[in-house]
Image (cartoon, grey):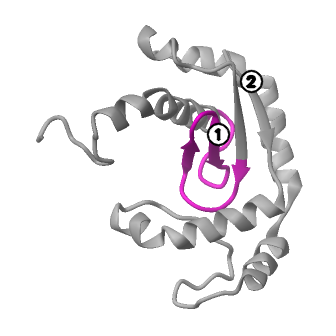
Amino acid sequence: MPRLNIVYSPEFEVDRVRYTIGKLAWFREHSYNISMPATWDEKRNYSDEQIAAMVYAEYDPHICEEQTDYLTEHWRGIATECTILPQKLLDTVLNEYTVHLTRYGVGGSYSAPNMIITNIKFRHDKGLVENILHEMTHLAIEQMIEKNQISHWYNTITN
């Protein structure tokens, strides 16, 4: 099972809110659930300073610390229990992943080669482990997806 380098910071949270605002139309079009600061209003435009103020007002590192402790204690056991990936995919699993814990944006996302972003507001404890495995699977098949130009919502049953 790969090692997890778990990171979180208010600066990353600010970046995550900005990123989510930039992709908001796409997320809405594809029916994603989105978590934003409590005082955020979708109809308003915010400056970077205003976004930062909203995030810092809510930021509580203890929430991320609790989930980091849970992952540190349970990662290997739950990940092994949940892993039913075909051997071909397991061969592409990396030795280490950087996992960004966030309270904003969608449930999870990834960036090659080894970055995973997971929303602890939507998933926590065992669900957080499952989400990390889900994003690892995306990273494992990303090259095949790009090579075959498969769209995001491709459905093998109807296509």
Q: CA distance from mark 2 to mark 1?
A: 20 Å
Q: Quadrant of residue 53?
A: bottom right
The residue at 81%/63% (across/down) is 11
Q: Between disc 2 and disc 1, whose residue precedes?
A: 2
> Is 17 above or below relative to 118?
below
Q: Position of residue 24 (x, y in %)?
A: 47, 71
Label at residue 115 = 1
The residue at 68%/82% (across/down) is 39
> Is 157 above or below relative to 32?
above
Quadrant in which the N terminus appears: top right
Secondary structure of the residue carrying tag 1 is strand
Identify the residue at the far top of this view. 87
- Magenta highlight range: 101-126
Label at residue 74 = 2
Identify the residue at the far front of this view. 147
The residue at 64%/62% (across/down) is 104
| Residue 57 left/right relative to 21 | right
Nearer to me, 145 or 129: 145
Label at residue 82 = none
Amino acid on which the number 1 mark rests in the picture: Met
